[in-house]
Amino acid sequence: MPLRASDAEREKAAALLREAATEGRIDLEELAERLALVSGARIQPELETVLEDLPARDAGLAAARPQTAARWSVAVIGNEVRSGRWRPGESSRALALVGDCTLDLRQAEVEGMALQITAIALVGDVRVIVPPGVAVELDGIAVIGSKKYELGEGPEPPSGAPRVRVSGYAVIGDVIVASEPPLRGLDRLRARLQRLRQPAQSGSASPEAADGR
């Protein structure tokens, strides 16, 4: 019978995930998804499955990754899009001047657990796209414009989830924080977790048998 996971073990697993994110091994979207899986883990094999492809430490690979962060994203009479694997840094600024600026954070490589984004929309729009499972805060000022959320329904972010703080300043423009469907899911990992949970619920088989080993 597999051992139950303790709160301390879940917190240790979450810390390893956060470390992997700061090293660039997983992006913001995957970090949020895996933290949710860790938060819901009930037995130790579930935690091991979430972490199985992540080394606890590997300074050589971490040092080899480029550390340059995109501090400014500017759209002047045009469009600027930051997407895919990019580093927003712990503090980034976006300016849309008679244009549109989009910061897609779903595959961003984070440097810390809190991202501060200053979004300035002057006769234009700034759109910040966040993955599900990330805690989001939006404040600021809008003059003949708006600052708003366009977030889909979903569960509350788990404890220790990454946080994005957006300070929006809109003049005849919009600052929008939105969520869109994940770029990719962790279907294989979720399937293995489900197989681990089935014997724990029924008590009829071992995790190894459920996993086909």
Image (spheres, rainbow, N blue to C red):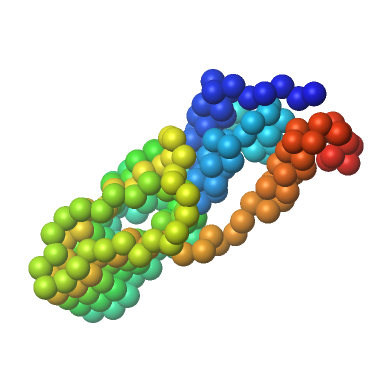
On the image, the x and y values in percent for residue 34 come to 57, 42
Q: Residue furthest left?
A: 143
Q: Residue furthest front?
A: 202
Instruction: Report the number of discs.
Output: 0
| Quadrant of residue 125 within the rendered picture | bottom left
5 lies above or below 205: above
Q: Is residue 122 visible?
A: no
Query: What residue sits 28% from the left and 78% below the top?
Result: 78
Query: What residue sits 41% from the left and 42% below the top?
Result: 162
132 lies above or below 14: below
State left or right for residue 147 relative to residue 102. left
On the image, the x and y values in percent for residue 136 come to 34, 50
47 lies above or below 29: above
Q: Nearer the viewer, residue 84 or 135?
A: 135
Q: Is residue 21 visible?
A: yes
State left or right for residue 194 relative to residue 6. right
| Quadrant of residue 172 within the rendered picture | bottom left
Q: Nearer the viewer, residue 109 or 121?
A: 121
* Quarter of the rendering occupied by the C terminus: top right
Query: What residue sits 44% from the left and 46% below the top?
Result: 156
Q: Nearer the viewer, residue 10 or 130?
A: 10
* Quarter of the rendering occupied by the N terminus: top right
Query: What residue sits 49% from the left and 35% below the top?
Result: 18
